[in-house]
Amino acid sequence: LCLAAARVRPWSACRGVELMPEVLHIGRGALEIADPSLLKTDAAALELLLGDMYAEETQALYTASDVVFVYATCLSSEDGKTLKRLSDALAASLRPGSRVVIVNKELDTSLPFTLTDTLIGPNPDSVNADARAFVYTFEGQ
């Protein structure tokens, strides 16, 4: 996803955090063979890290980010749609004005997240349902 983001617009940095080493290996391989002429972001600014999105070092990445993208299709939640734990982690770390784009799950809007857009498109993980991307602005504490 970092590689896709780098093809769309220039970023000062674009970092991905992946929990599964196998998926991280695939992503790093894609970065190695990517054609730099197709990127709008300097390839040196792209970084994929092995980690847990709830870990302290990841929280520091949220604090430094203007946009956080979460591909949440496999994350479970108590009500089947709202990621309370992730919402709490982001609310504790993001700066006011930061954006969060999350796929197929929602953030807890009882926290200072405002839903600003919903995008619907093909879902590569399902033949029966479209994917939904929810765009939130963090309003701050």
Image: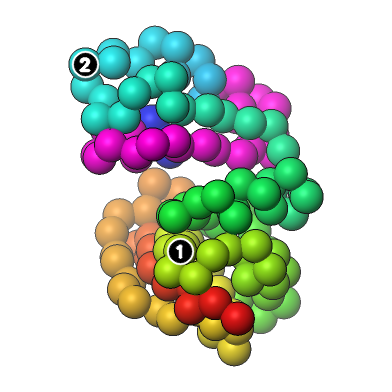
Q: Residue lying at the far top in this picture: please name it.
A: 33
Q: Is residue 8 magenta?
A: yes
SS at circle 1: loop
For the N terminus, which image quadrant? top left
Give whichever of discs 2 and 1 has the lower sequence position. Answer: 2
The percent coordinates of residue 78 (x first, y second) are 72, 77
Residue at the (74%, 44%) spot, across then down: 57
* 130 left or right, relative to 75: left
* 21 left or right, relative to 136: right
Residue 94 showing in the rendered view: yes
SS at circle 2: helix
Residue 87 appears in which quarter of the rendering? bottom right
Q: Mark 2 points at which residue?
A: 37
For the C terminus, which image quadrant? bottom right
Q: Name the residue under label 1.
A: 98
| Magenta stretch in the rendered image | 5-26
The percent coordinates of residue 45 (x first, y second) are 44, 27
Marks 2 and 1: which is nearer the front? 1
Q: Residue lying at the far bottom in this picture: please name it.
A: 110
Residue at the (28%, 13%) spot, across then down: 35
Q: How crowded is mark 2: few (under 14 residues within 10 Å), some or many (20 or more)?
A: few
The percent coordinates of residue 83 (x first, y second) are 63, 71
Residue 71 showing in the rendered view: no
